[in-house]
Structures are given as structure tokens and as C-alpha cells.
Image (cartoon, rainbow, N blue to C red):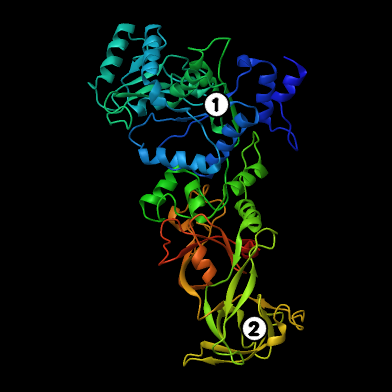
């Protein structure tokens, strides 16, 4: 292989290659597997993908793209009890949304059920596997401990013919679930617990979403995974660190098929762990089943579909994953870094609009009652090509209730009696008083405007300390706004063992505002998938499920600043 060819196989990026990429580059440079690169992403179709899977997707598909290889999508559908076509469809959608594609290389472990079954038969004939009739509890007890060798099953040395007969009858449905398993005959005294006669097959009498009732025995992950990699020609089987102890068993099984000319290689990297959330499928499923969230795609969920519905972008997720990187050491990543990544991305692309979440009316007493002006509002100051839009201005406006105080503390630079503020994109106004109801709540605020302070007028450069967003009361529309926050109020929620799971939930993870006031431009242009910055409030997106032209619903993606840092300090 020429030097120029080697350079093509080992592209460099700023900061160099991560350790997985370096292994792949070295293997390609050495000409392993004929210089071929093939990876795979192997999700189980028993739930929705979460952000931890996004890290694996970016690695599996990303390394293939970087080095000119291919990446297969293979569904690990070896447990029909927990699997569903809904999950298959959602996984496909999530991968495509992240920007990756597998072409015509969509596979299933069930594609290889016959080959795996025939391999199991061969291993039985060679004395490498046997049928065990013990209970799962007995098998677990006899496996021993890391410091104590296991005890051999009383069925370990039954004749080959008997094992063959029992295994075939297991698949014919003659025995009940849990009554028998097929185990590999390896070494019950091995220091690696996974080598102590691991289970290869178990009986499951449940229809499979692809194969129906054809099979009554289903392979275990450790037996099916490596063989599936081999059948597909996968060269690098990249997975997370919990599979490090499984690697010798992976290699043991795959070498029943592989030889020196080609053998898949397993490489492990650290999982993605996040503060203030859980990534356990079991716990996420519990949240869904107990109705604690609005399904797998609830905007508070760490699922890819939940993040998408909340307004996260593929770019922000990839940026976050690049920031945390890939190592051989487990770590917990601060969710604020993920939130920083989405703020950074949306700041560049989100259209600026005005919306008032908690409105109070402002009357500009010296402004003509029948006059409407259209103010030029910048769509995005970070993007010179974003342009502007028109926003109506009239005598009666809405501002945020929190932007007015009768008796303010020092450094309150918003609206106060006798004080001046600028209404963004419009005039400077001076507060002259307010009207209250019988309970002392402010109903209306009164102001006078300085007509000489509009953009382009002589007084437009006059400085005041406060600038407020607003909407015209006559022209605005109502919208429902959902203020989402972190789902858990405990930093290490996934590690807490001594408290009820429900106690860890953040009671303020969603607040609904039913009658927020939004400017006409937003009402007319909001479409699912769009991103907006509500001036001075945060980033929002129309809800893809519930938002309709006659009833607009906006989800808060993230606040403009990290309010949790202030709370925690």
C-alpha cells in the first residue's frame, strides 16, 4: 500500500483522532480484512432510542463515514416478548434525523436465526453445548463468584444424541418456558464469569414480529451478536464499556466461524451518562407506563424523539457529543453542557420574535387611538442574511407583568412609575401610573411615549437603561406555551437507591401557560420544526403533536441562560 493511499485511509482532524478512530486507522493501514471497514449500529427494538444511543450512532456511522467504510443498521430482535414494530419505525426515524443513512444495509438478528440454530446444532454435535434442565436460580447459584469457581451442572455430560433430541424438541414447542436452556460447555472455573457455561438459547413461546411462530427457541445476545457481525462482514464491532467482560466470550463464539482471513473486532468506549436524568430503558418505560410523562417523545424525556419534539437540533446533539468525546473511562456528563450546545446552535439560527408569557396591559395615553405603525424587527442579529419582519405597534400593548414594579429595588431597570424604558424596536416611554383591582393587582399601566425616539428620528439615539419586549394588544394572538425544565431535581438521579423513584421527579418540569400573547408574524409563520427565540425569554418550537393553526402550542426548548447554576449556588 502506497504512502498516498495510507494518508487517504487516515484522515486527520483538529485535535487528532480519538482512540477508536486510531484503532480503525491502524487496522486499515495494516491491511486487515483486506483493507475493508464495516461497522454496525445494533439497537434492540424494545424501546425508543435515547441520547446515549446518539453517542453510539455518531461513533458507528461517523467512523464509517470518516474512513470511507459502511455502517449497517441491525435490529437485535432476539426477544419477541419486548419488541414492537413501533420501536423499529422510531429507530429508523431517529437515525435519519441525526443525519445518517444505512442505504440498503438494514438487517435483523432474526435474518440469521436458521444459521444460528444450525451453528448451535453443530456445537452440540461437537460436544461444545448441552441442554440444562435446572431452574435459572439453580444455574445462577452454581455459577459461583468472581473468587469462587462454579459447580458443573448435573446435565453437563449428557450424551450428544440426547442433547440434540432435547434441543430440537425445545424448538418444536414440547417444553414450557424456563424448563430448559441450551448452554455452551466452556469452563465453570474460569476467572471470567461469562465463560462459566453461558446460556446460548432459551424457550420463548411468543410470536415474533418478523418470523411469527416459526421459532420457539431464541438465541441470547452473547451468542447471536458476534455471529451476526460475522455473517454481515462487520470488521469493527464498537460498543460501550459494560461489554468489556463479554469480549472474550464474543471472540470465543465468533471463532466458531471466523478464520485468519477475517474476524470481527470488538472495541469499547465509555457510555454517555447525564446529570438530572436517567437513561435506563426500564426506568424510562416506567415513566411512560405510569403516565408520568406524555409518552416516549415527551419533551422532558432524554429520548431522541423527545429532544426533537422539544426543539433540540441534530447539530446541537452532535456538538455535545464531540465536546464530551470518547474515552475508556466512565464519567457523568453535566447536562448544562448539552444545554449550552443547543443554546449555541439556536442563537445562530433561531428567528427572534416577541411573545408575552404573563401579560399585563400598557396604555400609551398620548398615542393616537386609531393609529397603527409597523416597526422593523430584526430576525436574527447573528445572521446578516436573516432579514427583518414587520411588527404592529398601537396605543395598547402587553408587556410581561414582571417587567413592572411600583416600588422597585436598586438596579431594577425595567418599568417603574416616573421611569423611562425603551420598547424594543419602537419608542422610549415614561410610566405615569397604574390601575389596580380590588385585591391590589395591577390591571393596567399608563405611559407616555416620546415620538422623537423612534428609529430614524432625532432622538432615537437617546439612551435608557431598560429595553422591554411587547406585543400590540389589538393585533396579537393567544397561544399555549409549555415551559419545560429538567425532569429530575436530583443531580445523580440514576444512582439514588434509598429513595422512591417518584420522589426524585421535578414537580416543576412542565408548566403550561394557556393564554400567552404572540405577535402576528409568529402566529402566521410557525411550523413544526421551526425554531424561535422569544425575546428575553428563551428558545421555543411549535409542538409537532398538538400545535394547530387554530390553537398554537409552543414548547420551550431551553432558557436563554442557565438558571440552575444560580439556584444551585
In depth, the one of 60 and 379 nearer the eye is 379
Q: What element carries label 1?
A: loop
In depth, the one of 279 and 523 nearer the eye is 523
The residue lying at 66 percent from left, 55 percent from top is 344
Above or below: residue 64 compared with residue 125: below
The residue lying at 75 percent from left, 38 percent from top is 14
- Percent across and percent down for residue 54 are 55, 41
Tell me if mark 2 has few (under 14), some (14-19) or many (20+) residues whose alpha carbon lies within 10 angstroms of its own: many
Report which quarter residue 419 is drawn in. Answer: bottom right
Tell me if mark 1 has few (under 14), some (14-19) or many (20+) residues whose alpha carbon lies within 10 angstroms of its own: few
In depth, the one of 152 and 362 nearer the eye is 362
Q: In which quarter of the image is the N terminus?
A: top right
Q: Name the residue under label 1.
A: 245
- What is the number of the mark on residue 309? none
- Percent across and percent down for residue 426 are 66, 78
- Residue 523 appears in the rendering: yes
Q: Name the residue under label 2.
A: 415
Q: Is residue 471 left or right of residue 453?
A: left
The residue lying at 32 percent from left, 11 percent from top is 163
Q: In this view, does 300 lie to the left or right of 210?
A: right
- Percent across and percent down for residue 227 are 47, 19
Above or below: residue 92 compared with residue 541: above
Q: In this view, does 139 lie to the left or right of 421?
A: left
- Residue 141 appears in the rendering: no
Q: What element carries label 2?
A: loop
**Dot 2 and dot 1 residues touching (CB under 8 Å):** no
Instruction: Say how many tags the image has.
Output: 2
In depth, the one of 56 and 140 nearer the eye is 56
Disc 2 to disc 1, C-alpha distance: 64 Å
Q: Earlier in the sequence, mark 2 or mark 1?
A: 1
Amino acid at each position: 500500500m502506497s504512502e498516498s493511499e495510507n494518508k487517504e485511509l487516515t484522515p486527520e482532524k483538529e485535535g487528532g483522532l480519538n482512540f477508536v478512530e486510531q484503532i480503525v486507522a491502524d487496522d486499515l493501514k495494516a491491511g486487515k480484512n483486506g483493507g475493508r471497514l464495516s461497522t454496525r449500529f445494533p439497537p434492540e427494538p424494545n424501546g425508543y432510542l435515547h441520547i446515549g444511543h446518539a453517542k453510539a450512532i455518531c461513533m458507528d456511522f461517523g467512523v464509517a463515514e470518516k474512513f470511507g467504510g459502511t455502517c449497517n443498521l441491525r435490529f437485535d430482535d432476539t426477544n419477541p416478548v419486548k419488541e414492537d414494530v413501533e420501536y423499529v419505525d422510531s429507530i429508523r426515524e431517529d437515525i435519519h434525523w441525526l443525519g445518517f443513512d444505512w442505504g440498503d444495509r438494514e438487517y435483523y438478528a432474526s435474518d440469521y436465526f436458521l444459521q444460528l440454530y444450525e451453528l448451535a446444532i453443530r456445537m452440540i454435535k461437537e460436544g461444545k453445548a448441552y441442554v440444562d434442565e435446572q431452574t435459572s436460580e439453580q444455574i445462577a447459584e452454581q455459577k459461583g463468584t468472581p473468587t469462587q469457581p462454579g459447580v458443573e451442572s448435573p446435565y453437563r455430560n449428557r450424551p450428544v444424541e440426547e442433547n440434540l433430541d432435547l434441543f430440537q424438541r425445545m424448538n418444536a414447542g414440547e417444553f414450557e418456558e424456563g424448563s430448559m436452556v441450551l448452554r455452551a460447555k466452556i469452563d465453570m472455573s474460569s476467572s471470567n464469569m461469562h465463560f462459566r457455561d453461558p446460556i446460548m438459547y432459551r424457550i420463548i413461546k411468543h410470536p415474533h414480529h418478523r418470523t411469527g411462530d416459526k421459532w420457539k427457541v431464541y438465541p441470547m445476545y452473547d451468542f447471536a451478536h458476534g455471529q451476526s457481525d460475522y455473517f454481515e462482514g462487520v470488521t469493527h464491532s464498537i460498543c460501550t464499556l459494560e461489554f468489556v467482560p463479554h469480549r472474550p466470550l464474543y471472540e470465543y463464539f465468533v471463532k466458531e466461524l471466523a478464520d485468519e482471513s477475517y474476524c470481527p473486532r470488538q472495541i469499547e468506549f465509555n457510555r454517555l451518562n447525564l446529570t438530572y436524568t436517567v437513561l435506563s430503558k426500564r426506568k424510562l418505560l416506567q415513566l411512560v407506563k405510569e403516565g408520568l410523562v406524555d409518552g416516549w417523545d415527551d419533551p422532558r424525556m432524554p429520548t431522541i424523539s423527545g429532544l426533537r419534539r422539544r426543539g433540540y437540533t441534530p447539530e446541537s446533539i452532535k456538538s455535545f457529543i464531540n465536546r464530551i468525546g470518547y474515552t475508556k473511562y466512565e464519567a457523568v456528563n453535566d447536562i448544562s453542557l448539552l444545554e449550552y450546545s443547543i443554546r449555541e446552535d439556536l442563537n445562530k439560527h433561531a428567528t427572534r420574535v416577541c411573545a408575552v408569557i404573563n401579560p399585563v396591559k400598557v396604555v400609551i395615553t398620548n398615542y393616537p387611538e386609531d393609529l397603527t405603525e409597523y416597526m422593523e424587527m430584526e430576525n436574527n442579529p447573528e445572521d446578516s442574511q436573516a432579514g427583518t419582519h414587520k411588527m404592529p405597534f398601537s396605543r395598547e400593548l402587553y408587556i410581561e407583568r414582571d417587567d413592572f414594579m411600583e416600588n422597585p429595588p436598586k438596579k431594577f431597570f425595567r418599568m417603574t412609575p416616573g421611569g423611562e424604558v425603551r420598547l424594543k424596536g419602537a419608542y422610549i416611554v415614561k410610566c405615569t401610573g397604574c390601575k389596580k383591582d380590588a385585591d391590589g393587582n395591577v390591571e393596567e399601566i399608563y405611559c407616555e411615549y416620546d415620538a422623537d425616539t423612534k428609529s430614524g428620528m432625532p432622538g432615537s439615539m437617546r439612551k435608557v437603561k431598560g429595553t422591554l419586549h411587547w406585543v400590540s394588544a389589538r393585533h396579537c394572538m393567544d397561544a399555549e406555551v409549555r415551559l419545560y425544565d429538567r425532569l429530575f431535581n436530583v443531580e445523580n438521579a440514576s444512582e439514588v437507591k434509598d429513595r422512591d423513584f417518584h420522589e426524585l421527579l421535578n414537580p416543576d418540569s412542565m408548566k403550561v401557560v394557556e393564554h400567552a400573547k404572540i405577535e402576528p408574524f409568529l402566529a402566521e409563520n410557525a411550523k413544526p420544526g421551526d425554531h424561535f427565540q422569544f425575546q428575553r425569554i428563551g428558545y421555543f418550537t411549535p409542538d409537532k403533536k398538538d400545535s394547530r393553526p387554530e390553537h398554537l402550542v409552543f414548547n420551550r426548548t431551553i432558557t436563554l441562560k442557565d438558571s440552575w447554576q444560580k439556584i444551585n449556588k
